[in-house]
Image (spheres, rainbow, N blue to C red):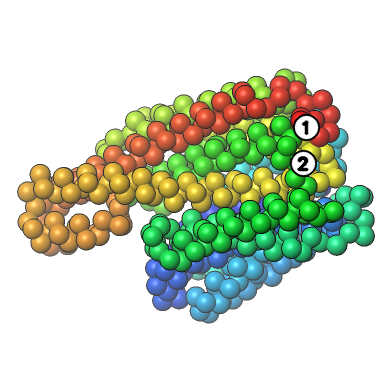
Amino acid sequence: MLAASILGSSLAFVDGTVANVAVPAIQHGLSATVYEAQWVIEAYALLLGALLLVGGSLGDLHGRRRVFLAGVGLFGLASLACALSQTVHQLIAARAAQGVGGALLVPGSLALISATFPQDERGKAFGTWAGFTGVTSGGGPLVGGWLIDHYSWHWAFAVNVPLALVVLGITWARVPESRDPAKSGTKLDTPGALLATLGLGGIVFAFIEAPTRGWRSMAVLLALVVGIASLAAFIRVERARPSPMLPLHLLRNRNFAGANLLTLLLYAALGGGLFFLPLNLIQVQGLSATAAGAALLPFIVMMFALSRWAGGLVERYGARLPLVVGPLIAAGGFALLALAGVHASYWSAFLPGISVMGLGMAVAVAPLTTTVMNAVGPEVSGTASGVNNAVSRVAGLLAVAVFGYLMASIFEPRLQQALVSSGLRGDVADGIWSQRASLAAIALPQELPAAAAAAARDAVHASFVAGYHWIMAVSAALALASAVVAAVWIEPRQGGEGAGTQ
């Protein structure tokens, strides 16, 4: 069961990162615009984020094994459709189908663990899951990049198909069925499902599109308003439903609510920080895409080596201690990363911070997952997993959108000042300034003399690093805030299934 859960989750996690690596090749191979290439990524993120809560509820209602199998099967078929796509619009549609499959299988993978393992063994089980999925998620871009470089971007998606078949075989043969017995014969809460999907979808769409269109865009504002209004209506509808998709008493559970708030803060720090870190490594420090992926290997090694041990800490000391200590360590890692300058050595300026951040996340992730799943008991584990996964996805999207504005607010005035003081010709400075939305990827005129090119490059890089410093500092503050939430909100020990209700 653990193997099926780990491999199934890895399908969704790896694909989300491999597609980022494949975008340049996709854009070239399918003659796609930048906006179309962006939607190759966003179609998956939008459907995944919008349907996670529905996917978890379906598992509790109709059988977690059944819904997990459906999700893996759909994901495998959609991956094949991605690999066979001949136009960018076919690829976007297939990526959307992958998102639907991911929304069915990701909550189910955690719910199967919660339903199978007794409470005193779940910490180590979730730790094993976190460690192995960390390895596969981190190794995905390396494998995907190699396939793209040596063969084609089509193979980056085709590789999912045999893996999906393996997961289907293991699950069909070895994983027992489980569901919430109290909901036997109950139908899906259709109004709740529609409102939850519309609410999460609207918010996710707004945060995806805001960096490109701007917050004043009518489409972004409308999506945000519709999303917030739908979630408000969802809460109202769920209060009146005899068998709601999301039992609202879960939100009054001290550990469940605290763990999800902690997830929002910590994964915002992680999602936002790790979005801009590779940009610094590639565009400022000059690493290749493969080297930048390898630069995060210490993070992956920490997750793999320590997650099972960290999951066992919950059994020995309760959840509060690791959920305070882990984010505190992660905050220290972000603070170390904030010290990197323009001409920085990976070994002295990035490796310590990445390693410390990995240690902190390794200490925190398995106890966090265990706390969420133990807080509610196995009968609603799918719903609990769907909520927590949706929170982590929205946190990452929110952070990228907000951090993008933070970066622009620092990058642009610094660049303007640097261009004035650099003494570059007016037409050169104007050409660089017109590309300011590209940040450190600004293309310099090829005919520039070496000295002028060096001055222009230093101006761009210094402006980006100034914004990068602030982003890592804010990430450290968010991780620190998540530790405070754990100290105040999480009970030191859970006394049994669903403990922590007030």
Q: Residue at x 35, y 37 (%)?
A: 470
Q: Which residue is mark 2?
A: 249
Count residues near mark 1 (Cα–Cα under 10 Å), then give few for <14, some for 14-19, many for 20+. Answer: some
Give the distance between the C-alpha atoms of the residues marked 1 and 2, in whole angstroms.
Answer: 8 Å
Q: Residue at x 45, y 76 (%)?
A: 30
Q: Position of residue 73 (x, y in %)?
A: 74, 65
Is residue 446 positioned above or below 391 on the image? below
Q: Which quadrant: the C terminus? A: top right
Q: Position of residue 304 (x, y in %)?
A: 63, 36
Q: Earlier in the sequence, mark 1 or mark 2?
A: 2
- Residue 412's tag is none
Q: Is residue 363 visible?
A: no
Q: Position of residue 110 (x, y in %)?
A: 74, 46
- For residue 349, which quarter of the picture? top left
Count residues near mark 2 (Cα–Cα under 10 Å), then give few for <14, some for 14-19, many for 20+. Answer: few
Classify residue 202 as left or right of residue 215. Answer: right
Q: Residue at x 83, y 42 (%)?
A: 378
- For residue 134, which quarter of the picture? top right
Q: Is residue 426 visible?
A: yes
Q: Position of residue 371 (x, y in %)?
A: 72, 33
Is residue 99 positioned above or below 125 on the image? below
Whether residues under marks 1 and 2 lie with C-beta atoms below 8 angstroms apart, the answer is yes
Q: Which residue is mark 1?
A: 501
- Residue kind at label 1, given as amino acid type: Thr
- For residue 310, which quarter of the picture? top right
Classify residue 379 as left or right of residue 360. Answer: right
- Dot 2 lies on which element? helix
